[in-house]
Amino acid sequence: MSYKEILASYKDVPGGMIEAFHAIQGQYSYLPEETIIEAARVFNLPVAKAYEVATFYSMFSVNTRGKNVIRICESAPCHVAGAADVVAALERELGIKMGESTSDGKFALELTECVGQCQATPVITVNGKVYLDVTPAKIPDILAEYK
């Protein structure tokens, strides 16, 4: 489905632009500029307002990034439980630093705030799927699910 079709399908839905942006990002892994401009037209808003929505929410990205978005919780409980070691393992395995994407476009690394799973820290998410009690030793198996 094209981004224009996605936007049109949410035109009359309350909160439709946010829902459309989720669907578009699910397809492209980010929100290309033309999709934001088209959203402004479809939802009858100034382009600046559409950009405000696209850039306000941390789950959206207006920059190209890898297909599988790995987010590492940077809250205090995860930090104390060893999130820095998990970050180091991810960076080592993927050959990229936090905030970067792999050259093949398969993975992106991002920090995020609390994901509400403090009972089992450190926590990472991959495309929204939550992984609890993550250790550096678990990283290769987690990544293998997405290769």
Image (cartoon, rainbow, N blue to C red):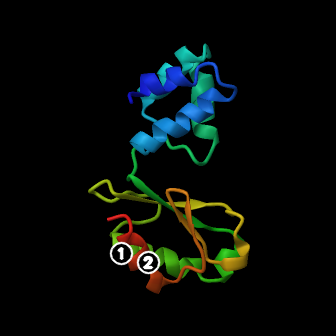
Tell me the element at label 2. helix
Name the one closer to the observer, 59 or 117.
Answer: 117
Percent across and percent down for residue 27 are: 41, 41
Query: To which quarter of the image does residue 32 belong?
Result: top left
Quadrant location of the C terminus in the rendered image: bottom left
Q: Nearer the viewer, mark 2 or mark 1?
A: 2
In the figure, is residue 118 to the left or right of 106? right
Residue at 57%, 25% in the rendered image: 10
Residue that mark 2 sits on:
139
Amino acid, disc 1: Glu
Q: Is residue 63 visible?
A: no
Q: Where residue 115 sits in the image (x, y, percent)?
A: 67, 62
Given residues 79 and 126, the one toward you in this image is: 126
Q: Give percent across and percent down for residue 85.
A: 52, 82
Q: Residue furthest bottom?
A: 137
In the image, residue 59 sits, relative to residue 15, either above or below, namely below
Kindly identify the residue that appears in the image at 68 percent across and 82 percent down: 80
Vertical comparison of 102 with 56: above or below: below
Helix, strand or loop under label 1 = helix
- Whether label 2 touches label 1, CB < 8 Å: yes
Q: Is residue 90 visible?
A: yes
The quadrant of the rendering that contains the N terminus is top left
Using the rendered view, name the quadrant where residue 2 is placed. top left
- Above or below — where is 99 with respect to 53? below
Residue labelled with disc 1? 93
Q: CA distance from mark 2 to mark 1?
A: 8 Å
Residue at point 65%, 78% (across, down): 121
Task: Report the label total.
Answer: 2
